[in-house]
Amino acid sequence: VEGVRLGRMLFYDNILSSNGLSCSSCHPQNQAFAVPFRVNSAGDTVSIPPVVNLAWNPEFEWIGQEPILEHVPLADFGPEFFNTNMDTLVKRLNAHSKYPQYFHEAFNVNDVAVLSDDELQRTIANAIVQFMRTIISDDSKFDKVSRHETAFTAEEMDGASIFYTERGDCFHCHGTPLFTNNTFNNTGLDSVLTGQNLGRYLY
């Protein structure tokens, strides 16, 4: 509970950055915790993946190169995202009205200044990931229909028929309950794969 509380606060707070960004800048709740288009440092247009239902994922990042979720937020401290000044961060955390209490109650850390930069980053990432694992989709209309609390409209029923039959062929990769089979597939969009579209070949 204490770790999730700390992680949630850090997720929405730009205190971690020197440029005004927070985790929620690229994972806004009102956009399903995702951003469809972003230009990365290599000039590629990429989408920011949602952080929903990650508790059941075996691999992370677009090409699955990271098997441990707690490692994913560590990259955010770098120049491309937060460009974090660790000295300034320590001072701001210690001067905050809530963070000293929250770090103590979550991790028994009485003063973040006693941690090395690496230790502090990993502690922060641990808290954020505890919160991220609570971001789940469990009360959509699909869930309510599954619980027999409501029913699909005729149009939605037709959509379900398309989704779950060879009419649409969606269900092979997007089966329930998570609508993913957590594998990596060539969807046939490109006949010649280059750059970021090489996907798993880059790993």
Image (cartoon, rainbow, N blue to C red):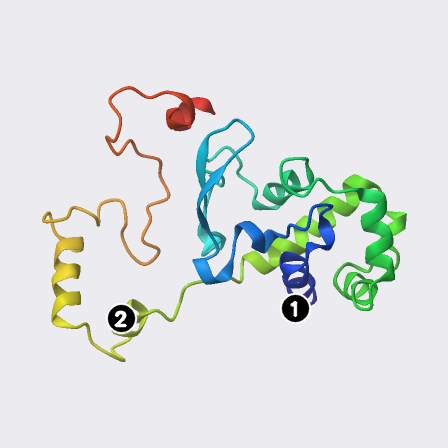
**Relative to 138, does residue 24 appear above or below in the rendering?**
above
Judged left or right of residue 44, residue 197 is left
**Relative to 55, does residue 140 appear above or below in the rendering?**
below
**Residue lying at 48% horizontally and 56% vertically, measured from the top left:** 33
**Relative to 158, does residue 19 appear above or below in the rendering?**
above
Kindly identify the amino acid type of the residue bearing the numbered disc 1: Val
Image location of residue 171, percent across then percent down: 21, 50
Image location of residue 74, percent across then percent down: 66, 41
**Residue 201 appearing in the image:** yes
Q: Secondary structure at mark 1?
A: loop
Residue position for label 2: 146
Image location of residue 17, percent across then percent down: 71, 47
Q: Which numbered circle lies on residue 170?
A: none
Circle 2 packing at 10 Å, graded few (<14), some (14-19), many (20+), is few
**Residue lying at 90% horizontally and 48% vertically, measured from the top left:** 114
Q: Which quarter of the picture shows residue 97?
A: bottom right
Q: Residue furthest left?
A: 167
**Residue lying at 63% horizontally and 38% vertically, measured from the top left:** 75
Q: Which numbered circle lies on residue 1?
A: 1
Quadrant in which the N terminus appears: bottom right
For marks 1 and 2, give the CA distance.
29 Å
Judged left or right of residue 41, residue 92 is right
Nearer the observer, 38 or 9: 38
**Residue 63 appearing in the image:** no
Image location of residue 181, percent across then percent down: 33, 46
Does label 1 or label 2 sit earlier along the sequence? 1
Nearer the observer, 197 or 134: 197
Circle 1 packing at 10 Å, graded few (<14), some (14-19), many (20+), is few
**Residue lying at 67% horizontally and 43% vertically, measured from the top left:** 82
Q: Which quarter of the picture shows residue 148?
A: bottom left
Q: Which quarter of the picture shows residue 7?
A: bottom right
